[in-house]
Amino acid sequence: MIPPSELSQLRAAAAQRTEAVAELARRICEVPAPTGNEQARAQLVASLWRERGYTPEIDATGNVYIRRGKRENGPVLMLLAHTDTVFPQTTPISVERDADILRGPGIGDNSLSVAAMISALDVLDELEKETDTDIIAVADVGEEGLGNLLGARTAVERYREKLGAVIAIDGNLGRIIHVAVGSKRWRIIVRGPGGHSYGAFGTPSAIHGLGRIIAAIADLQVPREPKTTYNVGIIEGGTSVNTIASRATALLDLRSTDIAALDRVAHEVRTIVEQRAGPGLQTEIEVLGERPAGERSQADPLVQLAASAITWLGMEPKYGASSTDANIPISLNIPAVCIGITQVERSHTLEEFLYVPPIGDGLAQLTRLCVEACTLIAH
């Protein structure tokens, strides 16, 4: 336990950094970082670490690592904050401040979290607080879209034998993500001979076959508990209005908090793809990504520490399920949670914004949890 006097110092130091964290988030946000093209933002983050006296490393995936502490042995605490965004490279990014609101695409998801990760270590350094284990801070890639949690997978695998716990930073302040929503992302491909819409009428169309598949998927009955979902998000195909399509594709997202339920719905969809397109058409499933499911109990010591840090702020913790970087350690039975820094709204839209005043509390929460998690895993 951290003595009350030290907690007061920690909270005061975090509060004083509220505006600095917001400004750091703005700087990070204004460097484009679509999934798969995070290099420029990685370089910025590395430079920010160097300014603070750390020696960052950028790996082949684009992850940026630093280590706080000089222990060669023993467990470590890992922090994960993803650098990638859902916005294309060409998206104009302008971060604007309007009183207590900071607005910009990607400002809350996840520029603020990267800024908070850096700033949490700033607070520890300012207070000259030595944690009971070393901290590995990772600004990681590939969390969004079809990134398939590449950065988190790479970082966790690198330190797997030494990981005592993982804290992912993402989402809203007051919420504790301790249930990992698993997913499967597929490209469904239908092929046929094609032809002229009039002259070759009756030739099977890849688009019509794909439509039959999508309609059958939409009729699937899935359990509400454990929550299991499906969605066709993108469809493509055909060359003109008067051409029988020779190829059509759909991107499918399947999700569940339960591995068995996810596998069941995936089996049902695979059967539909194999059987419902119709005569004369060939089908294929291309696996684009798989995110593992899992759960840490609310009674888990790390989850309880996260709840205590939120309660300390005068808030009621909210427990939930989501798909985050924490999926990877949770699926490997490594203690892990995902927490947020402030309230973020309109995520994944050009109108995304966050509230600045709670940042100080969010930073205090994160810093306290880092200290206490290190103590937990050291003993």
Image: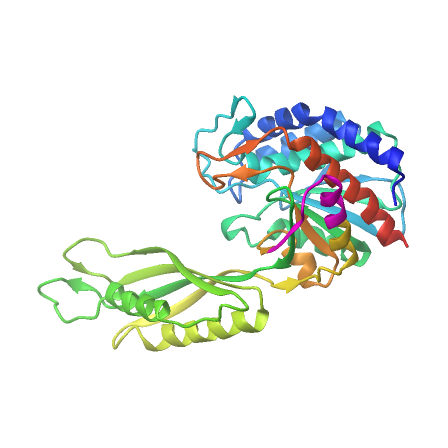
In the image, what residue occupies the spot 83% across and 32% down?
Answer: 8
Q: Image point 70% across, 57% down: which residue?
A: 329
Residue 316 forms part of the magenta stretch: yes
The answer to which image quadrant residue 148 occupies is bottom right
Q: Is residue 295 left or right of residue 374?
A: left
Residue 191 in view? no
Towards the viewer: 213 or 36: 213
Q: Residue 41's image quarter?
A: top right
In the rendering, at what x and y percent does residue 301 appear? 79, 57
Reply above or below: 361 against 188: above
The residues colored magenta run: 306-320
Residue furthest toward the left? 199
Residue 15 visible somewhere in the drawing: yes
Residue 308: % across, % down: 76, 47
Quarter of the rendering occupied by the N terminus: top right
Closer to us: 3 or 193: 3
Which residue lies at the image location 33% right of the left edge and 66% below the top edge? Answer: 214
Quarter of the image containing the C terminus? Answer: bottom right
Q: Is residue 355 left or right of residue 166?
A: left
Is 364 magenta? The answer is no
| Residue 128 sits above or below residue 84 on the image | above
**Residue 155 % position (x, y):** 70, 50
Q: Is residue 89 above or below residue 190?
A: above
